[in-house]
Amino acid sequence: MNIELVRARVQAGHYLVKSHTVYHALKEGFERKHMTSEPIPICGEHQVKKEWRPTTFEYSDEGVTIRVPNVYAWVCPESGEASFTPETVDELITTVRELIGIAKRARERRPALTEYVVSVSV
């Protein structure tokens, strides 16, 4: 893809963020800027309308895996590839960074417990 086309789309505010991009955003210190969501996006690979539904976001770093279930996203019905809204990306980045830090500190204590499930009700 042409970088000028990408730059123009970003500046115009027309794109969603796929889960793989969120993974890199967490690794590389990305912060959201100039992002908006599109109405009913089309999967570029399969040329079908994506569906707005819950999915699970998963991120792994240095032996620590964080899974965030029931995250709403635009999901390709063919491949399951999720595209997240900018607001969801912000929340995922903040939450996953915090949880990774907590998990790494817990691992340094060398606990007997190696798996934790945290649920937050609103």
Image (cartoon, helix red, strand yellow):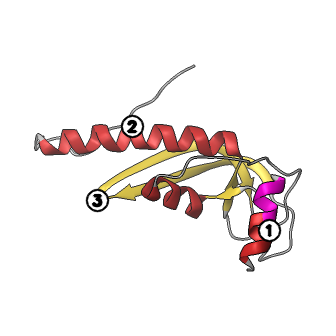
Q: Is residue 110 magenta?
A: no
Q: Earlier in the sequence, mark 3 or mark 1?
A: 1
Task: State the residue at coordinates (40%, 32%).
Answer: 118
First to last magenta residue range: 8-12
Amino acid bearing label 3: Glu
Check contact, mark 2 vs mark 1: CB within 8 A.
no
- Residue 62's tag is 3
Query: In what element is the residue under mark 2?
Result: helix
Secondary structure mostly seen in magenta is helix
Task: State the residue at coordinates (80%, 72%).
Answer: 5
Counting the numbered discs, the total is 3
Q: Quadrant of the N terminus?
A: bottom right
Q: Quadrant of the C terminus?
A: top right
Amino acid bearing label 2: Glu
Q: For residue 98, what is the image quadrant?
A: top left
Spatial CA span between label 2 and label 1: 31 Å
Query: In what element is the residue under mark 3?
Result: loop
- Residue 9: tell me if it is visible: yes
- Residue 28's tag is none
Q: Position of residue 115 (x, y in %)?
A: 28, 44
Query: In what element is the residue under mark 1?
Result: loop
Q: Nearer the viewer, residue 30 or 63?
A: 30
Task: State the residue at coordinates (41%, 43%).
Answer: 97
Q: For residue 113, what is the image quadrant?
A: top left
Q: Is residue 25 above or below residue 72?
A: below
- Residue 98's tag is 2
Q: Which residue is mark 1?
A: 43
Q: Earlier in the sequence, mark 3 or mark 2?
A: 3
Q: Nearer the viewer, residue 7 or 108?
A: 7
Amino acid bearing label 1: Cys
